[in-house]
Amino acid sequence: RIPDLPSDTVAADKHKIVLGFSQLGSESDWRNANTRSIQEAAKEAGIELLFDNAEQSQEKQIEAIRRFIERKVDVIAFAPVIETGWEDILTEARQAGIPVILSDRAVQISDPSLYVTFIGADFYEEGRKAGKYLLDKKRNDPGPVVIAELQGTEGSSPSIERGRGFRDVIRERADMTIAYSAPADFTVAKGAEVMRGFLRESGGGIDVLFAHNDDMALGAIEAIEEFGLKPGEDIVIISVDGTRKAFEMMAEGKINCVVECNPLLGPILMQAVREIYEGRTLPKRIVPPESVFTEVLAEKEVANRQY
Ligand code: GYE
């Protein structure tokens, strides 16, 4: 007679991978699409997801990661709200033997072996794409060109890198200047508020707006219209993400260019979790493909947007 399998073997076979994910917040449509993508992909992959929303607070993210360590999850992934300040908590994870994946945003860290891989967009390149569009758009216009910039969350990698990439490209035209620049936290409400301030200060003398995400651009459009100017005509608007709402604005001519940043990272993340769990080696950097869209294509593309 064939003996039954010992019950612990059966249990081990059935072990579901447990992933602790610390999401930084729910500040934008991009973020909400990112959250949905992660939750759906975990379900599809049969991975048990412990999900925490930190509401844009680094402290809350650190607490969530510490709870994941205490619960002995198999893998931790997180979207770091700002770049710095992660050494201690990541050292705690390492001491507990739990591998960590960076999702979406990068960190500045002295020991890169504290995380396994970083899955996310090349924000510097996104900034450069925005700058290149502007150089092209203004190629026949004599300057000066007065630019306003709505930055995202202060100290966050997308804001730092988009700003740097944009500056490195427009440097070519000495008559282009970023005369107004301030953080607006990646939200619609802050985008409107900060843009109102810029318009008041400049008396409306702004030629271009570079918004580090679509939500702030949408807020700024409200402010520009209130001020009696035409977004997309009086002020050229360039933003980043590629949400459906931004595409609708672009189809109406109120946004001129959107640099795509892909939030649908769930499937790639779940694959990485599984590979780490199986002991495979992953590349240190995984970048999803992204495009640039302008008004010419907006109407055709708007129906294809998934977020
Ligand atoms: O562009 C913005 C969101 O980290 C890439 O965060 C992400 C950014 C995205 O709030 O909309």
Image: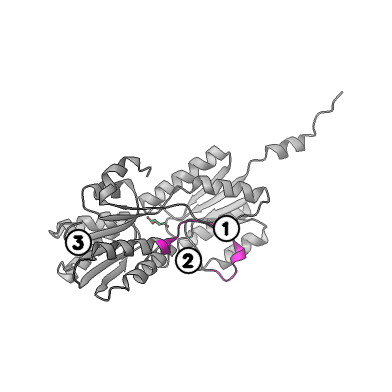
Q: Nearer the viewer, residue 261 or 141?
A: 141
| Residue 307 at x, y percent in the picture | 37, 45
Disc 1 from disc 2: Cα separation: 15 Å
In this rendered view, identify the residue nearer to me: 250 or 265: 250
Mark 3 secondary-structure assignment:
loop
Q: Nearer the viewer, mark 3 or mark 2?
A: 3
Q: Earlier in the sequence, mark 1 or mark 2?
A: 2
Q: Is residue 116 magenta?
A: yes
Image quadrant where residue 188 sits:
bottom left
- Vertical placement of residue 77 versus 175, above or below: above
Q: Which residue is mark 2?
A: 83
Label number found at residue 290: none
Q: Helix, strand, or loop for circle 1?
A: strand
Is label 1 or label 2 in front? 1
Q: Nearer the viewer, residue 169 or 110?
A: 169
Q: Rounded to the nearest whole Å, what is the CA distance between mark 1 and mark 3?
A: 40 Å
Percent x, y for residue 201? Answer: 18, 71
Residue linked to disc 3 = 235
Magenta-colored span: 109-125
Residue at (63% x, 44% y) in the render: 17
Classify residue 61 as left or right of residue 15. Answer: left
Q: Disc 3 versus disc 2: distance between alpha carbons?
A: 32 Å
The tag on residue 117 is 1
The image position of residue 272, as x and y in percent, is: 58, 50
Q: Is residue 160 left or right of residue 102?
A: left
Q: Residues within 10 Å of mark 3 (few under 14, many from 20)?
A: many
